[in-house]
Amino acid sequence: MSEIKTAAVLCTGCGIGEALDLKELARIAQKEGKIGVLREDPQACSAASVAALHAEIQEQGLTHLLIAGCSRRAKTEAFNFPGLALARCNWREGVLWSVPEGENAPELRQEMAADYLRMGCAELKKLKLPQANPKAAGNRRILVLGGGASGLTAALAAADMGHEAVIVEIAPQLGGWAAQWWRRTPWRAPYAVPQPTGIDELVRRAADHPLLRCHLGATVLETRGAPGRFSVDIATADQGQITEEVGAIIQATGFTPYPIERLPELGGGMSPWVIDQAGLESLARASDGAPIRRGDGRPVRTVVFIQCAGQRDATGRHLAYCSGHCCATSVKQAMYFKAAQSDVDTVVLYTDLRLPGMGEDFYRSAQTQGVTFVKGEAKAVTPQGEGLRVAFRDLILDTDSAVEADLVVLATGQVPRSGTDIDLPEEERAVAAANSVLKLAYRQGPDLPQLKYGFTDSHFICFPYETRRTGIYSAGPVRRPMDLAQAMEDATGAALKAIQAVESAAQGRALHPRSGDLSYPMVRLEGCTQCKRCTVECPFGAIDEDENRYPVFNESRCRRCGTCMGACPVRVISFENYSVDTVGSQIKSIDMPDEFSEKPRVLVLACENDAYPALDTAAMQGRRYSAFVRVIPVRCLGSVNTIWITDALNGGWDGVMLLGCKKGEDYQCHFVRGSEMAAYRLSKIEDTLKQMGLEPERVATYEVAITDVERLPRLIDEYVAKMFEIGMSPMKGFA
Amino acid sequence: MSEADHSSAYRREFLAEVEREVEGGTWVKMCMQCGVCAGSCPFGPHWEHSPQKIFMMIRAGQREAVLRSESMWLCTSCYNCVVRCPRQLPVTHIMHGLASYAQKLGLAPKLQATRDFSLQFWENCTRTGRVNEMRLTLGLYFREGLVAGFKQAWAMRTVAWGLLRAGRLNPAELVGGHRCADANGIKAMLAKAREIEARRKAQHGH
């Protein structure tokens, strides 16, 4: 890699040749950019041109190629040159289609195109060809934690696809909750009556599968390693200990029902005839299709189902969320009674009946069968005679009402079995009742990070199966509340992701969102000050610490967001194709107009996942924005090192706009915490600005979504207008 | 709405009775309480119980309150609710069915204008096979007594005079009045209809 040989193709297609002075640009590439081989092409993406390029690369032994033409997001299939460091210069979307029309448009376009060319040349020379993770390991086995419906489905999916799978189940038998049910909610047409659970078949298949092993009555003692090379110590039922070497892990540890003892006002724990949904499944199993009897043998003539028991609670005493499945479950259980004896009174007391998907058909089926649905809010369940009295507010008739019942079923919610909340301080973790599930030997804590209510964190919109620990996937009700059908679908998805993880790990490639990226973070340890910012801030827990408190990078756990690079105060962390230098050199490369030219320069650091595509789309739609900005895509706002900002301001840039994703609880950041970290770091930049004698407005952060196509050009124009308002930077000309 | 007797509250007895006895009654259980019927009804603000509430009262087992309700009698058969009901309940038919059943049981509210009109109209037109407008009009005018009847008739005198002059009102109809060509045929037809209804009821419940 010592010798680099650069080339540039200046595409003149799509109107570029007519709009820009290519002669001048070519001169810039040669004189300032020092590009070795340079040529113009009327349509660089044409099959003939691409073929010619491939030939040129071969003949001339090119190592670095700059293509000036369209956005880096366009024509990616044509411009795919494995083994070559590639930079793209965005003239089409970034200049031609975005500079506002007007008298001085040709001049502004030319200046902008020239700067982008300078930036492309600067970046090109700093790029190195990624060599792939040297610590890549290729264990293809998959460990599944939990042997319920989710775990069995995931393990069988993996095994059916040729991956050895290992199930670790804490109970002495497989099957989980589903094995204790009488029937399941129908999951395919005609959605009319409860269906057999099918769990026996799953258990039998798991037992017979040649690629599947089960440890029953077993728990995890410790999990070490990274994707492709996890070591999991397991305590087995016979007091022994074994270690499983696996490539990926699926956590399908399920849920526990919210305890009804916490609902004494609804009779929970106060009367034996008040049970939860699991309790009713037991009664139904015991009756085996005959009319359902209570524990004392008395036949049930009237049963009341109370929905949302201890759920959707606004008081803070119970679960705040809806578990999603319980309405359908109660409907199903009411049908148990109707199927055995149609004149049993079954009353479902609900405030909002929620049967998502095709559940509406199931609801209608229950109505046809004579299940009574009453919109009402349960107030109290008290003993009365041999049974119970359920007092409630009838929300349709707006009256206080009551109904007598032999049995009351409380539809309580799902509490995820996700382990410890690693965001709690260590001493509080010990107090919290939950035990660690994964027992990860990771610097950031022993379990998967949680988002809210104890459910494991995952990027809900884009990457629902991914957790914040690469190669470890959560599936089923531990990820979000769900029913059996959803859990099995979830588990299948998680199995596919786990397979993708082991295959990518073997090749040293990144997983989403930079799928296939071969670069990985490299650290110059001799410069490290052991400040721990990288180990603390990594959203994916990829970095441990050694005994001397130096960071230890686990490249296979890394998602290549660069948050560590942005965090590092001494800038010793970099990627081969993305570093403090690749961006820093671009910032320093432009031709800075003097203070009196009235041509401000605004640096836009735009998240490559959302903000940059939004800018491209805006340009495609003909939405124009100020020609005084220069946009550099960044992997994540979290990767923005403050040195870029101070360099820009020192270099005379008038303002810096940082465009990242939404942060917080309903974050949109593809790297979960990147934009939050950036916001945190930038909250401290005001002091720096003051020291430099600059206005605080010169650095601004915006949350931008990929859909902000209309808003973003407006934001840019407003920001540039503000720069005119506060005046040109006094720092120009000192660099 | 008595709350004293809980033992029948929210039990299936009354609903089962409605399903058995009331036209369209089997649909009541399919109501999902969305309230679109109540919101669509032009009489919404004027009656005590919207169709939504009537259906809920049936589920709650409030037999007396439902059958004595005036609400069904106020229905103008505009069919807005039927058109809009997402569960496709024949709401209008059920309301009329309930009214008819209440009338049969003698629980329908007395002196309810719609009920009075319906009864008079039916009696009037089935007797001769055609509607005697003189008698129907006067019957309605005097339903609340002699004084009220004369007042009403006096208030309408210019209309009556206009109708007389145009030959649209014949005082001679007050005595006897003319019949349709085959009054006995009409009677036979109605008897047959009653017979068919009874047979269907015996077979299907309603």
Image (cartoon, coloured by chain):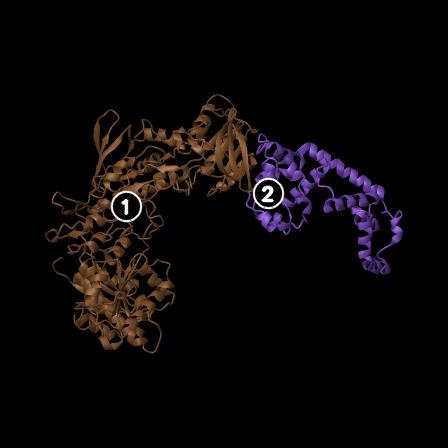
Secondary structure of residue under mark 2: helix
Q: Are marks 1 and 2 in contact (CB under 8 Å)?
A: no
Between residue B125 and residue A427, name the one nearer to us.
A427
Mark 1–mark 2 Cα distance, whole angstroms, equals 50 Å
The chain painted purple is: B
Q: Residue furthest left?
A: A526
Which residue lies at the image location 10% right of the left edge and 52% below the top edge? A526
Say what amino acid the circle numbered 2 marks: Lys
The quarter of the image holding the C terminus of chain B is: top right
Residue, disc 2: B53
Chain painted in brown in the figure: A
Quarter of the picture containing the N terminus of chain B is top right
Q: Residue at x 17, y 49 (%)?
A: A532
- Pinpoint residue A397: horizontal percent, then vertical percent: 57, 41
Q: Is residue A220 visible?
A: yes
Above/below status of A560 relative to A326:
below
Q: Is residue A216 above or below residue A82?
A: above
Tell me the amino acid under the disc marked 1.
Arg
Q: Secondary structure at mark 1?
A: loop
Q: Residue furthest top?
A: A297
The residue that mark 1 highlights is: A468
Where residue A80 appears, as percent x and y from the top left, is 26, 58
Camera-side residue of B76 and A383: A383
Count of all numbered marks drawn on residues in the image: 2
Query: Toward the viewer: A658 or A364?
Result: A658
x, y (%) of residue A283? Answer: 45, 26
